[in-house]
């Protein structure tokens, strides 16, 4: 009993401590993000062990400032025990982390609201359920502060991209709702006003790719960097999230998952559209070889970021810089 009380007090102290850690650029003016996606974790399946191996290896090697899980993380019961296996390596290292949903997370006995409530109560979790009037659970914003003072320097948007089509016969997967796009536009405009009319450098994270991903591939197939052999499983209706981002002028790149055999990145009208790398084991289809993650690094005071894929074992693929890499293509 005494040990249990001590353990609970320790976890509570971690939780309180984690609530007071702001995201900020380091003294070198860098802010590093790791994107894990589509882990499809099954606690009782030995095939999932490779996902935990990847997470531990990457966190120790890259030492990120933020970890982002972009959906389809849990894939079987017991759900909370499985989530603990995934989140604990991040928590133990006292790294802030964020979570957004894919189309499979809430298919195993816990709703999106229940999953988010569970995550939000974990130490160092920065995910939020968000405005309940919006479609989905987990539409929220994280601010990255300056290295020198407590003012905003970059903005990170997180969206619930839904699950399956709400209109029978119209494809398989969901699309953004009008109120999500309006919310983003209003929030972006407010941040731009705060910054004297200049958009902050921003990134966006969600699970299901926008309709612009296949459009970009059709128009610029030979210019894309990374694996691009799977047909994109985006929602069939284009409701205008990309157009809103381009008009707002803040988002430099979007980062998704969902399509396990894609990890490409390309430039579409000055926004880099990117996939993460399938991070799980053989609990779902994957044909790229080793599992991995995407590493993203922002540069303070600049509309710039660098990114690459890191595989289990340390191999680095497809280094890209915004806006330099595709500026002449």
Image (cartoon, grey):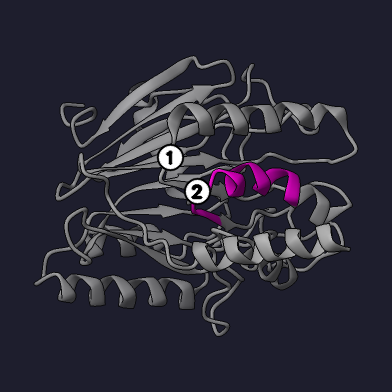
Q: Nearer the viewer, residue 205 or 83?
A: 83
Specify whether residue 169 is in view.
yes
Specify whether residue 218 is in view.
no
Range covered by the magenta-colored residues: 84-98
Q: Are marks 1 and 2 in contact (CB under 8 Å)?
A: yes
Q: Report whether 49 appears left or right of 262.
A: right
Residue 78 location in percent, x, y? 88, 52
Residue 64: image tag: 1
Residue placed at 74% from the left, 61% from the top? 6
Q: Residue under label 2, please give it.
A: 95
Q: Is residue 20 above or below residue 280?
A: below
Residue placed at 18% from the left, 31% from the top? 324
Query: From mark 1 to mark 2, how far is it between C-alphas?
Result: 7 Å
Q: Is residue 242 above or below residue 179?
A: above
The quadrant of the picture occupied by the N terminus is bottom right
Give the number of marks. Answer: 2
The quadrant of the picture occupied by the C terminus is top left
Residue placed at 74% from the left, 51% from the top? 83
């Amino acid at each position: 009993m005494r040990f249990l009380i001590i353990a609970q007090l320790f976890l509570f102290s971690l939780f309180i401590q984690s609530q007071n850690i702001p995201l900020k650029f380091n003294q070198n003016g860098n802010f590093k993000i790791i994107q894990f996606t589509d882990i499809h974790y099954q606690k009782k399946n030995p095939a999932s062990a490779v996902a935990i191996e990847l997470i531990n290896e990457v966190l120790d090697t890259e030492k990120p400032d933020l970890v982002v899980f972009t959906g389809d993380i849990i894939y079987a019961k017991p759900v909370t025990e499985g989530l603990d296996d995934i989140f604990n390596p991040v928590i133990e290292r006292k790294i802030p982390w964020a979570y957004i949903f894919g189309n499979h997370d809430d298919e195993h006995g816990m709703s999106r609201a229940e999953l988010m409530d569970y995550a939000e109560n974990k130490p160092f979790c920065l995910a939020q359920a968000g405005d309940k009037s919006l479609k989905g659970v987990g539409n929220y914003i994280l601010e990255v502060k300056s290295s020198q003072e407590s003012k905003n320097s970059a903005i990170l948007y997180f969206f619930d991209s839904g699950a399956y089509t709400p209109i029978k016969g119209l494809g398989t997967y969901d699309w953004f709702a009008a109120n999500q796009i309006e919310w983003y536009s209003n929030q972006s405009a407010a941040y731009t006003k705060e910054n004297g009319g200049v958009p902050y450098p921003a990134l966006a994270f969600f699970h299901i790719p926008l309709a612009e991903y296949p459009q970009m591939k059709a128009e610029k197939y030979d210019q894309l960097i990374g694996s691009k052999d799977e047909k994109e499983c985006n929602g069939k209706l284009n409701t205008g999230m990309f157009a809103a981002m381009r008009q707002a002028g803040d988002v430099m790149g979007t980062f998704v998952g969902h399509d396990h055999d894609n990890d490409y990145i390309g430039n579409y009208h000055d926004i880099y559209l990117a996939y993460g790398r399938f991070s799980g084991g053989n609990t779902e289809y994957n044909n790229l070889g080793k599992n991995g993650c995407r590493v993203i690094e922002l540069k303070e005071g600049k509309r710039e970021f660098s990114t690459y894929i890191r595989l289990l074992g340390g191999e680095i693929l497809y280094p890209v810089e915004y806006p330099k890499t595709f500026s002449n293509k």
